[in-house]
Image: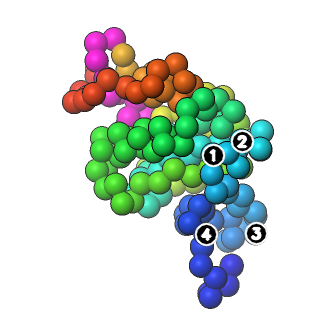
Amino acid sequence: MGDDDELPDHHSPVRDMLAEAHGMPHRAYRSLDEARQDPDAAVVMEGDYGGTIYLTCPVRLVHCDAATLERVLWILDELYWDEPDSARVYYEHRPVGSGVAGGSGGGVVGDGVWVHPELERWVVDDGLGLTTALADVIRGRRTTIPAGPYREGA
């Protein structure tokens, strides 16, 4: 990318810059529907302009709509950074086992819903961890998670 080129809005600046520095492609999709065409696409939720990877999930496991994913992002961002202008959902070519560059240790695309370890300890209500609740929403098993306030579990 040259100096005069503007980064497309659907590209993570952090991962685009790293891909360019290493001479690697960075495939990002404009929408969830477009990403569904790639069997190795993943959802990547980040905060702090890439400073923290909140959540990853293979797109093939997503059974909710893009608006629901955005609501999930806002919940995660409120718990971690509370900087909604710096939080984004990206759809990228990331096969299972791929690392996801970002601050706070980055992330990984597993064969399920991966949530940053700092967020795993949050509890939505008695007996329901935030990670399980989020996975249920993403997989279409529930439409929303119970309203907060959430608390840190043991």
Which residue, given by chain and number where applicable, does mark 1 sit on? 32
Are the residues tagged 3 and 4 within 8 Å (C-beta)? Answer: no
Foreground: disc 3 or disc 2: 2
Which residue, given by chain and number where applicable, does mark 4 sit on? 8
- At horizontal 45% and vertical 25% (from top left) the residue drawn is 143
Foreground: disc 1 or disc 3: 1
Are the residues tagged 2 and 1 within 8 Å (C-beta)? Answer: yes
Q: Quadrant of residue 85?
A: bottom left
> Which quarter of the rendered picture does the C terminus lie within?
top left
Q: CA distance from mark 3 to mark 2?
A: 26 Å
Are the residues tagged 3 and 2 within 8 Å (C-beta)? Answer: no
Q: CA distance from mark 1 to mark 4?
A: 16 Å
Q: Pointer 2: residues within 10 angstroms few (<14), some, or many (20+)?
A: some
Q: Determine whether, in the image, residue 147 is placed left or right of residue 139.
A: left
The residue type indicated by label 3 comes to: Gly
Q: CA distance from mark 1 to mark 3?
A: 26 Å
Foreground: disc 1 or disc 4: 1
Q: Which mark is residue 23?
A: 3
Would residue 43 be seen by someone viewing this image from the given angle? yes
User: In what element is the residue under mark 1?
Assistant: helix
Q: Pointer 1: residues within 10 angstroms few (<14), some, or many (20+)?
A: many
**x and y, in percent, of residue 5 in the image:** 64, 82
Q: Determine whether, in the image, residue 154 is placed left or right of residue 137.
A: left
The residue type indicated by label 1 comes to: Leu
> Which quarter of the rendered picture does the N terminus lie within?
bottom right
In primary-sequence order, the first of circles 3 and 4 is: 4
Q: Which mark is residue 36?
A: 2
